[in-house]
Image (spheres, helix red, strand yellow):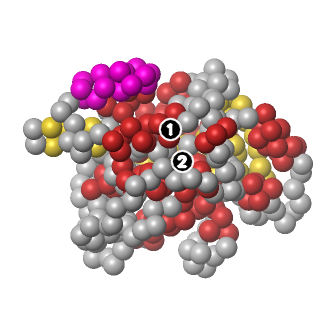
């Protein structure tokens, strides 16, 4: 499968850890030998101890903050009778606040992105998450996390999540010839832009002139931050491109066919998403309908109506109606 990346050497590796919380932002730099990703915490009752933890992994070129609103709603809907959920919104390597952290060793692929999540748990001395939810590219990071955890890659103390949610992310390899190549076109376009962007308006107008939608152009603009007299991306485009290539190449069908014992893998397909072909949908339905043995976990398949790929924005209420009862069943 062809690559769309123009790779650059990693510059100036410096080990640094950063933690951001939504209620009281602060920077945390423990004396560790590995870099750990940035994150935010969302709780319905921050003053109370939490009982359960869900990690939320965003998609390509996004960040944890994209999921703040949905995470607040989810935590609130799950809070009852003394139960308090903590949502950990992770900024994957090369994205969001993690893009400011040096020390993430290449290759920038699904394996290392998933290992970053395990390193975060270890660095904070947390219990392992009860649930991992991943959207788009984050869905494959979540699948890789479960796959590596089941093989003992993260050590004997690592515990598989009870539920793994994959939101509108095709579990197999992605052939760009079978899609409209919008993501590839976006990545190629962003790589061709100057490193400093004059303004958000300039970017939006430029993307519109190239034929991209207004919604996509404005969303890309939201990933710009002030840097001196111009704007700069909140992600590392070259490294993100490597991650996208890894996302396209990874195949997790065997994991869906034989989920690890004690784990349910839930696949959510957005009804209006253009990422699914009939053969893939049929394969998902067949796997979900076949009951696994007692030595294996479960795989479930859910259709989110009236939504395109951006499930947490286009139909957050419908997504909550699918996810909330399943998470509540863990209590």
Relative placement, left or right, of 20 versus 107 is left
Taking depth in this image into account, of 172 and 187 the one nearest to the observer is 187
Between the C-alphas of marks 2 and 1, the distance is: 11 Å
Tell which of 208 and 275 is nearer to you: 208
| Residue at (73, 35) in percent of width and height | 277
Q: Residue at x 50, y 61 (%)?
A: 109
**Residue found 28% across the figure and 43% down from its top:** 233
Q: Quadrant of residue 144?
A: bottom right
Q: Are marks 2 and 1 in contact (CB under 8 Å)?
A: no
Point out which mark residue 129 bears. Answer: none
Quarter that holds the N terminus: bottom right
Above-or-below relation of 297 to 125: above
Q: Residues within 10 Å of mark 1 (few under 14, many from 20)?
A: few
Secondary structure beneath label 1:
helix
Mark identifier at residue 137:
2
Q: Earlier in the sequence, mark 2 or mark 1?
A: 2
The structure residue drawn at horizontal position 54% and vertical position 65%, both measured from the top left corner, is 111
Q: Is residue 215 left or right of residue 294?
A: left
Residue 209 in the magenta stretch? The answer is yes
Total label count?
A: 2
Magenta stretch encompasses residue 50 = no
Left or right of residue 260: residue 185: left
Give percent across and percent down for residue 140. Answer: 59, 52
| Residue range corresponding to the magenta coloring | 200-214
Instruction: Name the residue carrying label 1.
Output: 183
Question: Residue 262 at x, y = what percent?
Answer: 74, 61
């Amino acid at each position: 499968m062809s690559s769309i990346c123009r790779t650059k050497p990693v510059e100036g590796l410096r080990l640094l850890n950063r933690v951001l919380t939504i209620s009281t932002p602060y920077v945390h730099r423990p004396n560790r030998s590995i870099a750990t990703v940035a994150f935010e915490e969302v709780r319905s009752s921050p003053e109370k101890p939490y009982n359960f933890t869900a990690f939320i992994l965003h998609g390509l070129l996004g960040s944890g903050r994209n999921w703040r609103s949905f995470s607040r709603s989810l935590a609130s809907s799950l809070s009852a009778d003394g139960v308090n959920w903590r949502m950990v919104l992770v900024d994957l390597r090369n994205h969001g606040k993690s893009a400011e952290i040096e020390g993430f060793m290449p290759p920038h692929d699904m394996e290392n992105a998933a290992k970053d999540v395990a390193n975060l748990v270890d660095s904070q001395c947390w219990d392992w998450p009860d649930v991992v939810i991943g959207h788009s590219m984050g869905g494959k990071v979540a699948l890789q996390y479960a796959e590596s955890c089941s093989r003992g890659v993260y050590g004997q103390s690592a515990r598989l999540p009870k539920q793994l949610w994959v939101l509108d992310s095709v579990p197999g390899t992605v052939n760009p010839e079978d899609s409209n190549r919008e993501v590839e076109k976006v990545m190629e376009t962003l790589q061709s832009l100057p490193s400093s962007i004059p303004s958000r308006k300039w970017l939006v107008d430029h993307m519109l002139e190239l034929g991209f939608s207004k919604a996509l152009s404005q969303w890309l603009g939201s990933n710009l931050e002030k840097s001196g007299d111009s704007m700069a991306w909140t992600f590392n485009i070259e490294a993100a491109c490597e991650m996208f290539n890894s996302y396209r190449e990874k195949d997790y069908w065997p994991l869906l066919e034989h989920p690890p014992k004690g784990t349910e893998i839930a696949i959510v397909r957005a009804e209006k998403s253009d990422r699914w072909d009939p053969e893939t949908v049929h394969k998902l339905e067949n796997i979900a309908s076949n009951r696994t043995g007692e030595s294996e976990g479960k795989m479930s398949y859910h259709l989110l109506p009236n939504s395109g790929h951006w499930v947490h924005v286009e139909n957050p209420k419908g997504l909550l109606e699918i996810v909330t009862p399943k998470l509540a069943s863990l209590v």
